[in-house]
Structure formats: C-alpha cells, structure tokens
Amino acid sequence: MHLTKFGHACVRVEKDGRRLVIDPGGLTEPQALDDVDAILVTHEHFDHFSEEALRRAVQDNAALKIWTNTSVARQLDGLGAGVTAVGEGEVFTAAGFEVKVYGTWHALIHPDIPRVTNIGFLLDDALFHPGDALTVPDATVDTLLLPVHGPWSTTGQLIDYVRAVAPRQSYAVHDGALNEIGTAMVGGFLGGIGPRYDHLTAGASVEIS
C-alpha cells in the first residue's frame, strides 16, 4: 500500500495500480485527484470536502466512485449512481480496497456549535482515517492517520487516543494550520508515547506494509 500525503487532511492510497483518495477538500492540491478511481469523504467541512472539485473530477472521469455520509451525498445530488451514502458498520469495496465505516459524529467543538455527521474509514483492516473525530475502531489498526491539530482536541486527548487505538505507527493529518514550531511541538509530544509517529510534508509518500 503506497500512501501519499496531500494538503491538510487529504491522503491518496495506491495498491495494484488503483488509486483511492480520502478527504480532498478546499486545502488540497488539485493533483491529488489525478487518475483516481475512488474517493472517500468523512464529512462536509470545507477542509475535507470540495463539491466543486468532486463534480469536476466526475465530469473528467465518469467511472469515478464516491463514498461518503448522507449529508455530503445530498450536496452531490445529480451525480447519480457514482455517489453512495454509507454509515457506521457498513463494509464495501472501493478501488480494490475493503473499506469499513466507523463513527457517526464530528468531535464536539463547543455546545453552541452544531455537530455534523463524520465517518471514519478503515482500509484493508490496516489503515484508518477518522476524519474529525477520535473514533476508536473495534479492530486492530496498523497505521493511524492522526488529526493532530483542530479546535476540538488537545495534545493530551491525542495521546490518549493513540493509546486507545494502539496502532503500530501513526502519520499526521489535519495539520494545515500548524506552522513549523507547532509541528515540532506536537511531534515532540506524540513521538515519545510509544508507537512510531511521523509527520509527512505535502507530496511525501511512504510504503505501508
């Protein structure tokens, strides 16, 4: 499995010549969607979901498939059978990956701010992208894509989350608002709690075994 980090919360995963992208939002480089076979979207916030980019991608590739929650699927009305709404507990195959869905809600920011639906995706029982939530799947996770910076979590909560999921390794996502100092500070804390932790710059790739 070949993992490439793109802007903020987006990653592209490749296997056997197939390409799957998770959360190509408003902070994602356009090339993330080049020659993609499937797209997964965790929730509707602009940094994870760009209606314009997804409609353009489907226009360029009529065979492209998108899986997301009901709220996002409604915003993609008119794209027909290429868009499938899924929820917690569902399992499907996308671009050759087995995908399991976990979670229901975006993490709470404040009681006065309405929560939106958020689902996480576990690929091939190995790689987990939780979106904007600290969802703990009832499965062994080899590689966790860890949302390291947002208005809804603290570093302490992230440490507890990594310990609860217990992955072999984690890679930072949701880091677009961090400068170099913030990235180093977060890495200093998360790098010393047990599982291997790495921060990938945009465009960097790694092999996931």
Image (cartoon, rainbow, N blue to C red):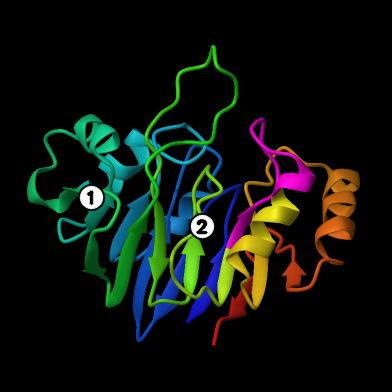
Q: Secondary structure at mark 1?
A: loop
**In this rendering, position of residue 126 left or right of residue 150:** left
Say if 140 sits above or below 181 in the image: below
Q: Which mark is residue 136?
A: 2
Other-residue count near label 2 (Cα within 10 Å), few / some / many at <14 / 14–19 / ≥20: some
Query: CA gap, disc 2 to disc 1?
Result: 18 Å
Dot 1 corresponds to which residue?
86
Magenta extent: 145-157
Instruction: Report the amino acid beneath label 2.
Output: Val
Residue 138 in percent (x, y) is at: 43, 65
Tell whether position 141 is magenta.
no
Residue at x 15%, y 56% (from the top left corner): 62
Say if 121 sits above or below 71 in the image: below
**In this rendering, position of residue 137 left or right of residue 99:** right
Residue 201 in percent (x, y) is at: 71, 60
Q: Nearer the viewer, mark 2 or mark 1?
A: 2
Say if 165 sits above or below 18 in the image: above
Quarter of the image with the C terminus is: bottom right
Q: Secondary structure at mark 2?
A: loop
